Amino acid sequence: MITTSSEPIIGKPLPRKEDPKLLRGGGRYTDDANAEGQAHGCVVRSVYAHGLIRDIDTAAALAAPGVIAVYTNVDLEAESYGTLKCAFNAEGRGGKPLIKPPRHALAKGKVRHVGDPIAFVVAETREQAREGAELVEVDIDPLPAVTSAVAAAAPDAPQLWDEVPGNLAIDFHFGDTEAIEDAFQRAAHTTSLDLANDRVVVAAMEPRAALAEYDQETERWTVRVGCQGTFGMHNGIAALLNVEPDRVRVLADQTGGSFGMKSGPYPEYLCVAHAARALGRPVKWRDERWESFLSDNHGRGSRIKGELALDSDGNFLALRVTGHADLGGYLSNMGPHSQSMNLVRNLASLYATPLLQVSTKSMFTNATPVGPYRGAGRPEANYFVERLIDKSAREMGIDAIELRRRNLVQPDAMPYKACSGLTYDSGDFPRVLATAVEKADLPGFDARKAESAAKGRLRGRGFCSYLEVTGPPGKEMGGVRFDEDGGVTIVTGTLDYGQGHATPFAQVLADTLGVPFEKIGLLQGDSDELVTGGGTGGSKSAIASGGAIVEAAAEVIAKGRAMAAHVLETAEADIEFRDGAFIVAGTDRSISVMDLAAQARAGIPDLPEDIPGDLDVALIHETAPSSFPNGAHAVEVEIDPGTGQVFVVRYAAADDFGVILNPMMVDGQVHGGIVQGLGQALGEQVTFDADGQPLTGSFMDYAMPRADDVPAFDIDYVEVPAKTNALGVKGCGEAGSSGALGAIMNAVVDALSQYGIEHIDMPATPERVWRAIQEARG
């Protein structure tokens, strides 16, 4: 299919450019890469959740066949390397900043969770490295462990860090306490719920891996690693090595999923880089799946009390959220951001709530560190609000959909300053809700409920309206290159780890510059090719890279006008650009941008010195402010009261993602987010025993969602363009999770309401549901 700007392709469901290669097994992931003469590394991890390291004996390991070296923190400290950094900064109550204890790549003096890295063994083969690691003897004096944020706040809880009294990293607070209290005192009705947002394993399809090489002559490292942006990762690894960023090159081919987990450096990346330089040969490491459960940042992790104040007509007066957030044993790259400031940004949702208060205590616990996970505070914020709304509706005798409708911010209120302090630029929340209600087929629910009852099953329905705040503004590279083979390459610093950037980005460039879609390629995975890069995350890639591509295309056109005027022997003022060609106004004389680029490559005769010799562009784009994707999801579930099994049987949704670049790819993003939300709602939860040992350490005992858990999705889009970016897009990558949690759990509670059950925590596992039914029956 040949396409140009004369046939606009933004908005068309074009297939993903990379899929033929991936489906044929041609994908190249980090573990597929090998270097001549490479050695292999294996990490020795703590088997205790908390303890003092008395001794590390490496003699037996060093004597083992094939073992080349064993490194501990002593070796790394001798090189004056840095520590892993938390990029999030915030002040808590009383102006006290977030406490950031140092996180060494290999444990120093103490271990703080099962899986904490202690030593790094390098050998000729992967198997020999593993066998050598098993021979490292680590003498640890176990200490009492605490794996719950609430328990970590107790006065007698085990203390993880000397410099963090009471395990409290930050006592975060947002809001006017007096005004909130006054609103609750004036309220005709208040409701409250204790809500769990427990830990989950990220479980990306591709385990983490890294391959490091060191060039003795240039004193530069090349590190291959799956990540969310090579520019940011090269800065992070350079900081770990304590060198300037230009001494580190990061390469990433395909990355098999991340969801936030691969956004920052990990201890193993310093280990392979150190070993590569120390040994003078490449060193490769890859996680086993069981290690991923221990070493990859976990997601979510909070317990809160939510409170909603309403007047007699059901208008929201104030929302208050108080609770504890689980950090794990160390601060991840974003630390408590998801359960503090990102809660504030997203709890306001799409309602005209005047007042908001958020108070969360972020606690260190003897568990794997917690980091960003698909939504990073957005799904749980919407879940908290939507559960409170449903409970309020039941208590006040108001239809739950009507209660939502009464409190929606109206379209004529835009731009609207929310209680979070953010200003919404666009949205038609009533139309979105109405679309979802229509798709939910409410008139047919009673008949479907009767059909379920005939099978001995309960049936419930649930709604969730949501609004997300995408990533904040920053900088992104906009690069366009006209290649020797006649192709065009987009260069930008976001990174595709499953989203499929190549197609929508090419659609943007094809429509903006009029170059053939099929000739457009994408370069993202080489930090040496980037002048900056914000990476992928926060549902902002289309905003950031899309805006950068639009700006770069405008720069190509500006450069091309002068060149085209010379080639066409006319004044630059007479040159127009449309449909991919430079045209002499009022004539039929023209040259396409592709032909002009080809002539430039060949060399244009007598080209004046003040006219650039090519059309290539590499610029730094100041990205647009956050956007506000929103939607309404409607779910129906069946429950087998004899077993407690929950079945999601209907799922409809209406979403506003602004201008949709490629509806097929948006469908995929929404579907994936919904499934991850379903997983957390119905099955996923990390649990520990009293000693801090994980009880959910593999897919044998950690309940991931499966294909037969998922119904067909009926999704529609209400396109209300954003007014703050060039494309009018709003971001869609995390929205499915934000709609799913509340909709599914509200449906579960609705089904159980005939037993008088008003709430059940996630995950609504068969055992938990069955027990709730038995207790309600007495």
Image (cartoon, helix red, strand yellow):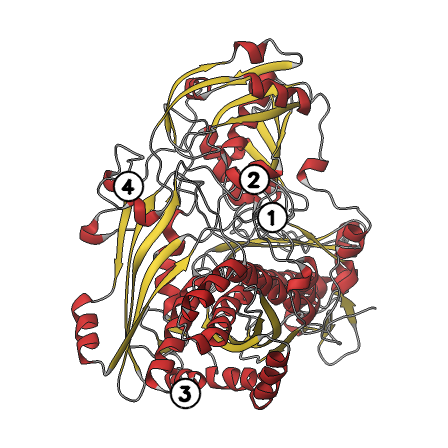
**Does the rendering let one see residue 180?**
yes
Q: Amino acid at mark 3?
A: Asp
Of the residues tagged 3 and 2, which is closer to the observer?
2
**Which of the numbered marks, if any, corresponds to residue 204?**
1
Q: Nearer the viewer, residue 314 or 518?
A: 314
Report whether 105 appears left or right of 701. Answer: left
Q: CB of mark 4 within 8 Å of CB of mark 1?
A: no
- The local secondary structure at tag 3 comes to helix
**Does the rendering let one see residue 216?**
no
Report whether 734 appears left or right of 256. Answer: left
**Residue at image location 47% in from the left, 28% down from the top:** 46
Q: Nearer the viewer, residue 629 or 220?
A: 629
* Spot occupied by residue 559 in the image (x, y as percentages of width and height): 64, 60
Q: CB of mark 1 within 8 Å of CB of mark 2?
A: yes
Q: Mark 3 sits on what residue?
A: 412
**Which of the numbered marks, if any, corresponds to residue 292?**
2
**Which of the numbered marks, if any, corresponds to residue 35?**
none
* Spot occupied by residue 618 in the image (x, y as percentages of width and height): 59, 52
Dot 2 surroundings within 10 Å: few (below 14), some, or many (20 or more)? Answer: many
Q: Is residue 53 above or below residue 364?
A: above
Dot 1 surroundings within 10 Å: few (below 14), some, or many (20 or more)? Answer: some
